[in-house]
Image: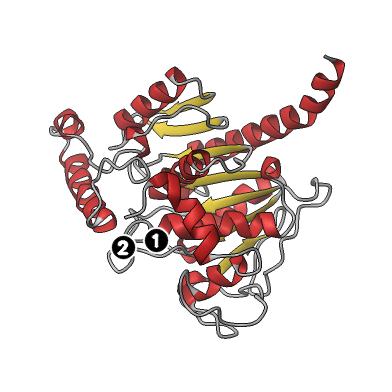
Amino acid sequence: MLPSSCLVRHLKQHAFSPTHAAKAVFSGVGRSAGPAAPQPAHHAAGRRNDGFRSVYALGYFPGGSRCGRDGGRMDSAAGAPAGRVILYLHGGGYVLGSLNTHRALVGSLAQRCGVAALAINYRKAPEYPFPAALEDALTAYYWLLERGHVPADIIVAGDSAGGGLALALLLALRDAGEPLPAAAVGLSPWTDLKLPAGTLRSICQEESLLLEALEIRSWGPLYAADTPLNHPLISPGRAELHGLPPLLIQISNAEVLGDDVRRFADQARAAGTPVTLQVFDGLVHWWHLFWRFVPEAATALDRVADFTRQVWETEEAAPAVRQAA
């Protein structure tokens, strides 16, 4: 296993050169390059299109409009600043989930934020354990940079395991001295795959929560495989959390991961990372997926949009402030 500080450099040298970055997303890191030039995947995961391997297909969700069968361009909502994009990493315990399960959520988030969003169907465990998912997330990030997006125009977001993966992406980039995105958003992020015994004790009187926790706990070893569960790129809650961009973390006080996420937020703040923690009341894990039916989920997505606007307004104001100084 490569040390975390070497992972990004190894990928840049061996998995995707600037010309290979997009091909790697479609054709597989370390595999044959596939088509000479990558084309957008017009269909969601599970279907092969133009020779691309479906497991690496990219999904595009134009901001401000629904992504139908003919989607596939990185289009922004009318009036949205050119270049701004959300890189979204879906949840599912590193073993479940796809572009299909999260298409509506990502599309709604893109519309509310008024920017384009890019979601990837990263490789899943147990067939592809760590660091496969992180490799794919890094590949997607560099693919955006190759297309002309600057780091300050990218916000990384994800739910559950995807939220943890978004945080791991930040850590890998920071440790490699690479440019960081403007911010990250974790929707009930999975920050500690060990799911400590204290967490189990705190919910042991709630049968449904205990069963959910035991199931989630069984997924961690499938992803980690031969790597310890406390590896910082597997469990960001075990990492040094300094030097990261602003974070928005949303959690419910009734879900399994609640205590772990609050601890992560406290640790990040103590390390000097700006953290906005928003706690919602009485909602089950993965509640963001039900934004059509759960008012609190719709409210949460609106707050994500408020956060992204605030981040980018701050980025816009920064040059003027530095010039005035």
Position in image of residue 318 (x %, y %): 77, 25
Dot 2 corresponds to which residue? Answer: 125
Question: Disc 1 vs disc 2: which is toward the camera?
Answer: 1
Specify few, some or many for label 1: CA neighbours under 10 Å numbering under 14, 14-19, or 20 or more: some
Q: Residue at x 13, y 34 (%)?
A: 204
Q: Is residue 44 visible?
A: no
Colour setup of the view: secondary structure
Q: Nearer the viewer, residue 93 or 251?
A: 93
Instruction: Name the spot of residue 126 as percent of width and height, x first.
Output: 27, 65
Q: Residue furthest bottom?
A: 51
The C terminus lies in quadrant: top right
What amino acid type should be assigned to the residue bearing mark 2?
Answer: Ala
Q: How many marks?
A: 2
Which residue does the numbered mark 1 point to in the structure image? 132
Q: Residue at x 18, y 28 (%)?
A: 202
Quadrant for the N terminus in the image:
bottom left
Direction from residue 168 to residue 81 in the image, left or right: right
Question: Mark 2, residues whose alpha carbon is within 10 Å: few (<14), some, or many (≥20)?
Answer: many
Q: Position of residue 112 (x, y in %)?
A: 66, 44
Residue in front for this viewpoint, 117 or 299: 117
161 horizontally vs 10: left or right: left
Q: Secondary structure at mark 2?
A: loop
Classify 201 as above or below 46.
above
Q: CA distance from mark 1 to mark 2?
A: 9 Å
Q: Position of residue 281 (x, y in %)?
A: 39, 28
Q: Residue at the far top: name it.
A: 325
69, above or below 161, in the image: below
Q: Are marks 1 and 2 in contact (CB under 8 Å)?
A: yes
Q: Residue at x 72, y 27 (%)?
A: 314
Dot placed on the residue nearer the N-terminal end, 1 or 2: 2
**Which secondary structure, mark 1?**
helix
Whether residue 181 is visible, yes or no, is yes
